[in-house]
Structures are given as structure tokens and as C-alpha cells.
Amino acid sequence: MITTVDYHTGGEPFRIVTGGVPGIPGADVLTRRENAPAHADHVRRLLCHEPRGHADMYGCFLVPPDDAGAHLGALFWHKDGFSTACGHGTIALGAYAVQEGLVEADPDGETDVVVDVPSGRVRARVRCSGGRVAGVTFVSVPSYVIARDVAVAGTKVDISYGGAIYASISAGALGLSVEPRHLTALVGHARRIKAALAGHPATRHPRDDRLSGVYGVIFYDDLPGDAVSDGRSPGGELPDGGLPGGGSPGADGSLRQRNVTVFADGEVDRSPCGSGTAARMALLHDAGLRGTLVHESVVGSVFRARVAAVTAEGIVPEIEGMAYRTGRHVFELDPDDPIGTGFTLR
């Protein structure tokens, strides 16, 4: 028997496993991530693969935090394995911890839920009104630019870190836009870009190789009212107030973009992607953005991001969204079921 509480954040699923997972050894969450495939991969497959899940399913195993300074530890998983970060999942964990009474919350104020994840310690700042969760802000690990204008697969990408490493490219540079009708083409480009970047020096984490490798490719559009998609005029010069690789701020200092993140092996994030938004903020702050990023997803959901602090390691992004519980489940595997832990069709 495996029990879960399911949420969605901005349309992206997040399955929190509350019981039935074997113990995963390790002195910290990052080490537990290394050990998880040998101890609990059958549970990941069971919950993520069809017929109980689908190719774009996402979730986590709750594990002990690294020390008493955090409330929870989380190992994030998807159909292809275990990831280093998940902002939309952290937002869901904040809502879950407060709604289930795991963390005592101010009924009319903000309460931090501290979570240890493979990339470090993050926070879900849960805002309540009248005793109900009204919003959650994901406070990321320090995020930073790794490289710009990296030539790959016939185009150029910017590479940045937001708990995981992402490559960013304007969809317009490929003759596409961030719309559902272009998803098949964008997924194809993402797979080519990611494969071409395998082993590239710009995809190495500077301090811990266990965090290396491109996790996702982010395609973005500037929404109406902003500058041309690469922030430059047709002649190549930067317009007044423009941002290289990301449009032009509005009168209030905010920037509006729509993105889709294709992560792991062709999985499509329905939300604006929390750790991807952190990685985008690193690029945009480096380019001069000092206001809010209004980040819209391919299904129309929205995160709002800002830089909370600048440290020696990088910026600390805060990303506001909301998660909603969708159900409670008890899963089981019939020992006579020939399908076993399931399958994926892509």
C-alpha cells in the first residue's frame, strides 16, 4: 500500500508520497538522491508510469531533512529519474505542510516551511488568510549565470543555474512561439539541444558535479508590449531599457514573458517552472532587470518572481504561486498483474 496526497501548481502535477516507501539511506538529501534508484525506484515507476501516472507526472518522496533547521526533506522524481530541484513542488510542499498541520502556521500572516532538497535548503513562504492558504512563495537557492551565447544544435543558448541547470532560448529564434500547437516542435528542439550539450563544460556545476548536466531547456516569448524577443533592434544594438536575451521592462519595472520548460527526456512543464524561473531571473538580473518577472506558462498559469537578495553565490529569487490539492490516494500492485510497475509510451 502506497499513500499519496496530490496537488497541482499552475497546472503541473505533484504527487507527495506519504507512506509505503522503503528507507533510503544517506547522511543528507543529496546523498539520498544518489541512493534512491537502488532502494525506491520501483515505487517511483509505479506512481509515475501508466496506468497510475503518465509521461509528464511529477512527485516526491518525503525524507528526513539534513538537520533540525528544516521541517522536511524531499526527493523529487519524474518518469526518467530523480531531479535536483523543483520549485513548483516546493510550493506544493508548503501548502501541504500547513494544510496537514505538519507546520503550525499564522492564520493571517506568513509562515516559512523549510525544505531540504538535493540542491540545498529552500523555503516555501506560506501566506494564510482566515486560516486558509492564499499563496506560497518559493525562495530558491542562489541562482546565477553560467554561460551566454553557447553555440549548440545550430543555434545559441544561455545557460544558468536555479537549483538545476537550464538552457534558455527565445522560441522566436527557432521560428516558433510558446503555444500548445508548437509543443511537438519545441520538444524536438529541446531533445536536440540537451543531447548536444551533454558533457559540455558549460553544463558542469562549479562546486558539486552531482548537480551537473542540463536538466531542462526553457523556451520563452516576450508578451505584447515588450521589445523584440532577443532584446535587440534589427541592427543588433540594445534599445533603451532593453535586456539582452529577454525583452524590455514596462513602466513599473516589470517584465512579462511566457515560457515552456521541457525537462528530463521530453517532459513538458505545465506550470511556469519554479527552478526554471529562478534560472531565468539569474539571466535577466544579470542583463539589468530590477523589477518583477511576470512569468506565464503554456497553459496560462502565472508565477511572479523577484530578486530578494544578491549574495556572493548569486541572486536569491522569490517566486510566488499557488498549489491546490487534487486528491488523496492509496495505490497497490497486484502480484499477478503482468504490467507490473507500469509503462510509458514516450
Image: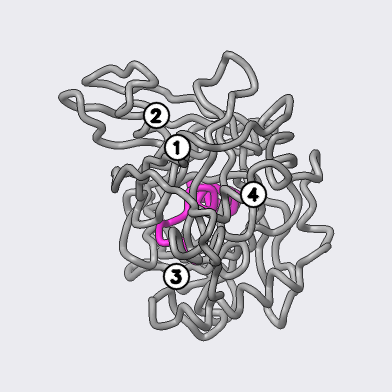
- Circle 4 residues within 10 Å: few <14, some 14–19, many ≥20: some
Q: Cα distance, mark 1 to mark 2?
A: 6 Å
Give the amino acid at mark 3: Asp
Residue 135: give x, y in percent of width and height.
29, 37
- What's drawn in magenta, residue-wise? 268-291
Question: Which residue type does callout 2 highlight?
Answer: Arg
Secondary structure type for disc 1: strand
In the picture of the structure, the residue carrying the numbered disc 3 is 221
| Structural crowding at the residue carrying mark 1, measured as other residues with C-alpha within 10 Å and reported as few (<14), some (14–19) or many (≥20) | many
* Residue closest to the far left: 130
Is residue 261 toward the left or the right of residue 22 in the image? Answer: left
Q: Is residue 327 left or right of residue 50?
A: left
Q: Residues within 10 Å of mark 3 (few under 14, many from 20)?
A: many
- Image point (48%, 82%), residue name: 176
Mark before the other along the chain sequence, 3 or 1? 1
Q: Nearer the viewer, mark 4 or mark 3?
A: 4
Callout 2 secondary element: strand
- Mark 4: which secondary structure? helix
User: Magenta span has 187?
Assistant: no
State which mark lies toward you, 3 or 1: 1
Residue identified by numbered label 1: 138
Residue at x 66% of width, y 68% of height = 157
**Residues under labels 3 and 1: Cα distance?**
23 Å
Whole-percent x, y for residue 325 in the image: 29, 43
